[in-house]
Amino acid sequence: MEATRTKPVAQLFDSATVKEAISEAEALVPGYTYKGFCAKVAGAGCAGYLVSFLGKRVLYYGRTGETHTEYFPGTQPAAKS
């Protein structure tokens, strides 16, 4: 399978827009497509992502190392005191 880039990756990483795209995907908003998701996160500066099934999370990263960690639904770790 060949990957197709739908939109250039923005220079700046916008974690709020990445989170918004994730929320739309989880809610399966009308008109949602994976291609649209990829375009939205690329426009928000996401250069790629790494899925850890054992860690139950996805790490989204930007061009210069910025990250957003999204935990699988229902697996958010407890806050550290």
Image (cartoon, rainbow, N blue to C red):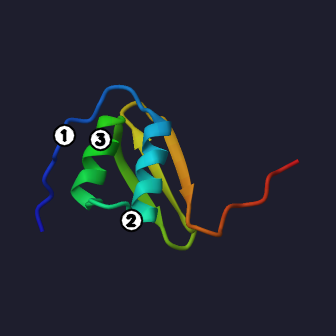
Q: Amino acid at mark 3?
A: Ala
Q: Looking at the image, which is closer to me, 54 or 25? A: 25
Q: Amino acid at mark 1?
A: Lys
Q: Residue furthest right?
A: 81
Q: How many numbered discs sit on the rendered protein?
A: 3
Look at the numbered disc 1 and give the secondary structure of its residue.
loop
In the picture of the structure, the residue carrying the numbered disc 3 is 42
First of labels 2, 3 by sequence position: 2
Q: Is residue 10 found left or right of 51 in the rendered image?
A: left
Look at the numbered disc 3 and give the secondary structure of its residue.
helix
Instruction: Locate residue 37, reporting x and y percent.
Output: 30, 52
- The quarter in which the N terminus is drawn is bottom left
Task: Check whether the beta carbons of the residues at disc 2 and disc 1 lie within 8 A of each other.
Answer: no
First of labels 3, 1 by sequence position: 1
In the picture of the structure, the residue carrying the numbered disc 2 is 28
In the picture of the structure, the residue carrying the numbered disc 1 is 7
